[in-house]
Image (cartoon, rainbow, N blue to C red):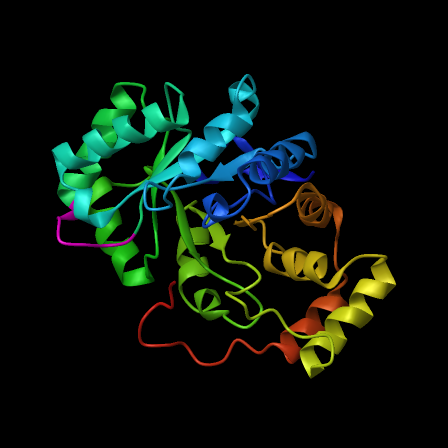
Amino acid sequence: MTQRPFGMTQRPVPVIGQGTWYIDHGDRAAAVAALRKGIDLGMTHIDTAEMYGDAELVVADAVDSRRDQTFIVSKVLPSNASRRGTITACERSLKRLRTDRLDCYLLHWRGQYSLTETVAAFEELVTAGKILSWGVSNFDADDLDELLGVAGAGRIACNQVLYHLQERAIEHSVIPWCEAHGVAVVAYSPFGHNEFPQPGSAGGRVLETIARAHGATPRQVALAFLTRRASVFAIPKASSAGHAADNAAAGHLTLTKDDIAALEKAFPRGKEPRSLPML
């Protein structure tokens, strides 16, 4: 599995990780097996959140006895993101995950509390050793500018944002901002939310052609395209061990310049929207 420095942390993190949204809605044993298989194959970056129901409990089962091999990320809800509320939420997540620290802790999206309060809580948690780094999710470039003014340079580890073949809005301003400031970009829902191109569609045919040339699958091609820039990581979810293995194989796939050009033509990024798309 290809690894890259994760933003300002400089810690090596696999380019393909594992998401857990809705992972608690199906068979619990299968979900745990999928995460464990992913870890076996190098997908040691596991993303979760307090909003995701029992996902943190599923992650705890999956990483039991393997905590030191994993890079665990969780998120605080905006409604909990006051200074005291953030600390309480983090301690609750640590208990559910059965660990003494998070590798990175994120503000899930902007809410009613000032960034000053949330950042102060993050820094307090860093000092206490309960989180090793912190970042945000669903922040546009203007939000990141404001956050930088609050936190100062070299503190924001990552920005987790919606990014898939048919939603490339972050390429306009967010990715360039993050690259300029040493912030990792983490793509959530990298296959879209029930939006992955169908085999018979024009885009689907392009994916199939490129996949055949590499002995890969269309989903592996999609992940390789999204992570073609050194700043970008992806966290697809897998509901089975087989699906996890398919995702992990994308971490070894390198697309050619012609492949990338064909995908950019098939899935144009379009104009920059007024607001950042999110789920």
Q: As rendered, which of 57 and 89 lies closer to the eye?
A: 57
Q: Main secondary structure of the magenta part?
A: loop
Left/right of residue 238 with respect to residue 219 in the rendered view: left
Q: Is residue 131 visible?
A: no
- In the figure, 106 relative to 96: above or below? below
Visible in this render: residue 71? yes
**Residue at 34% over, 26% down:** 94
- Against 179, is 123 above or below? above
Asked whether 262 or 150 is in front, the reply is 262
Q: How far across and down, in percent of the image, does residue 193 sit?
A: 50, 65
Above or below, 212 against 248 in this view is below
- Look at the image and tell me in which quarter the C terminus lies: bottom left
Magenta stretch encompasses residue 110: yes
Magenta region: which residues?
109-115
Give coordinates of residue 244: x percent, y percent: 66, 44
Q: Quadrant of the N terminus?
A: top right
